[in-house]
Image: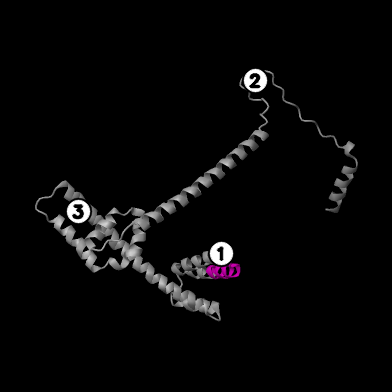
Amino acid sequence: MAALSFGVAHLRSFPNLIKVPSRPKICCVWDPEGVFKTPAQTGHIDRLEFKRRFEKDADAKDDYERHLREEKERREALRQSRVIPDTDTELIEYFLDTEAQEIEYEIARLRPRLNDEFFRQLQSEIGQLRFAMAKTEEMEDRLIELEALQKALSEATEAYDKMQSELVKAKQSLTKIFTSKDVNSTLLEMVELNELNMSLVTLLDENIASAHRSDQKQAAEYMEKLRASVIKYVTV
């Protein structure tokens, strides 16, 4: 290895002794299709194009964020303008008139009203239309609407109740972790009891986001580390 290094150093000391043959230049006079032409120098143009696209993307981002704000304000205004009905019959019409993306919000807000009595009223109206002696096209359309509403509300309320139950358990689990003197041991104990799940992770995400908004950096960092530990056990 030393001899090789010496040899290289020696050659570099006498560059004139090294003869490197020059590469022949290609010269072509007849080139009707422009195969050998010099490529265009587009560096400056590329930079201008990149700048133009960057500014365009920034404008598009601003437009998108403005659209989101306007849509959020529109939905909030719409929610405030809706008057909650008094009777179950009116409540059925209320849900039929509600936009699809607002159904989830209305179910959360009106969950106590979506009780057995409400669903009996809905089933009663469906039965009257289904077993009517003479059905019109309007009645057929109404039946389809009510059956679809019944299915949607039944599935949505079941999912909402399950989510609320999991949320309550997640809050209890999070309190258990926060008040623990030995977090690692507590996590292992909760793994055995099957108390670590994605509902707990979701609750941690909400708390982390809230801590960041309140500029509570230490709390956010602690919960992020805690989240990493929880998600490790959840995915086992």
Label 2 crowding class (10 Å Cα cut-off): few <14, some 14-19, many 20+? few
Which mark, residue 130? Answer: none
Which residue lies at the image location 22% right of the left edge and 60% below the top edge? 89
Residue closest to the eye, 2 or 214 = 214
Q: Main secondary structure of the magenta part?
A: helix
Label 3 crowding class (10 Å Cα cut-off): few <14, some 14-19, many 20+? some
Residue 217 inside the magenta-drawn segment: yes
Which amino acid is tagged 1? His
Circle nearer the viewer, 3 or 1: 1
Which residue lies at the image location 41% right of the left edge and 70% below the top edge? 167
Please tell me which of labels 3 and 1 falls first in the chain: 3
Residue closest to the eye, 213 or 154 = 213
Q: Name the residue furthest left.
A: 133
> Looking at the picture, how far across and down is residue 117, in whole percent?
22, 67
Reading the image, the residue beneath label 1 is 212
Reading the image, the residue beneath label 3 is 143
Q: Is residue 195 above or below residue 212?
A: below
